[in-house]
Image: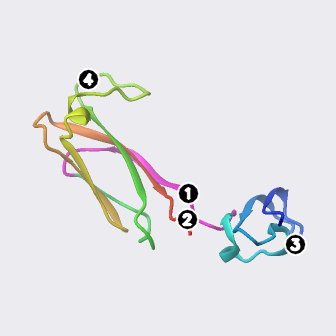
């Protein structure tokens, strides 16, 4: 079995961080980013952006991604007081909200007629 996880100082380049190598690869014997699932220079499972956007709004990612990211979103009523954890409302339970996601943007739509906005989080989870 190989040693796949390093937390702290990497023995080859001396940098500090967290490294998780691919199956069969020893994390201590390489610094090649292609050998890691998680490493300081690898953009896997990385929070790209978050915010609040209105109906029909488009959130453009900072760069075009090689894979479509996960977008978590929750519709909110602009006139209501909302807090975390997000409440379940008619828009989410009735399926009246959609989010179209590509490798370069996410577009949010409210089909309920309630004038909802959206809280969203974009995560690059393109693990090999």
Q: Secondary structure at mark 1?
A: loop
What percent of the width, then of the height, locates residue 48? Answer: 48, 56
Q: Badges 2 and 1: C-beta atoms under 8 Å apart? A: yes
Answer with the quarter of the image where residue 32 lies: bottom right
Q: Secondary structure at mark 2?
A: loop
The relative height of residue 79 versus residue 99 in the rendered view (above or below) is: above
Tell me the tag on residue 12.
Answer: 3
Q: Is residue 73 magenta?
A: no
Tally of numbered tags: 4
Mark 2 or 3, nearer chain start:
3
The relative height of residue 34 versus residue 14 in the rendered view (above or below) is: below
Q: CA distance from mark 2 to mark 3?
A: 24 Å
Q: Which residues are magenta?
A: 39-56
Mark 1 or 4, nearer chain start:
1
The residue to which callout 4 is attached is: 80
Name the outermost residue toward the top: 81
**Closest to the observer: 92 or 42?**
92
Q: CA distance from mark 4 to mark 2?
A: 38 Å
| Disc nearest the viewer among 1 and 4 | 1
Residue for point 21% across, 43% down: 97
| 102 sits to left or right of 121 | left
The residue to which callout 1 is attached is: 45
Q: Badges 4 and 2: C-beta atoms under 8 Å apart? A: no
Q: Badges 4 and 3: C-beta atoms under 8 Å apart? A: no
Q: CA distance from mark 2 to mark 1?
A: 7 Å
Mark 4 or 2, nearer chain start:
4
């Amino acid at each position: 079995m190989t040693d796949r996880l390093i937390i702290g100082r990497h023995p080859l380049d001396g940098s500090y961080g967290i490294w998780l190598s691919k199956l069969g690869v020893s994390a201590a014997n390489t610094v090649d980013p292609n050998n890691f699932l998680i490493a300081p220079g690898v953009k896997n499972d990385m929070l790209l952006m978050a915010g609040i956007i209105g109906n029909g709004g488009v959130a453009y990612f900072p760069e075009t991604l090689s894979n479509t990211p996960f977008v978590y979103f929750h519709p909110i009523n602009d006139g209501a007081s909302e807090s975390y954890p997000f409440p379940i409302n008619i828009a989410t339970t009735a399926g009246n909200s959609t989010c179209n996601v590509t490798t370069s943007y996410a577009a949010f739509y409210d089909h309920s007629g309630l004038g909802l906005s959206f809280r969203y989080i974009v995560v690059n989870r393109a693990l090999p």
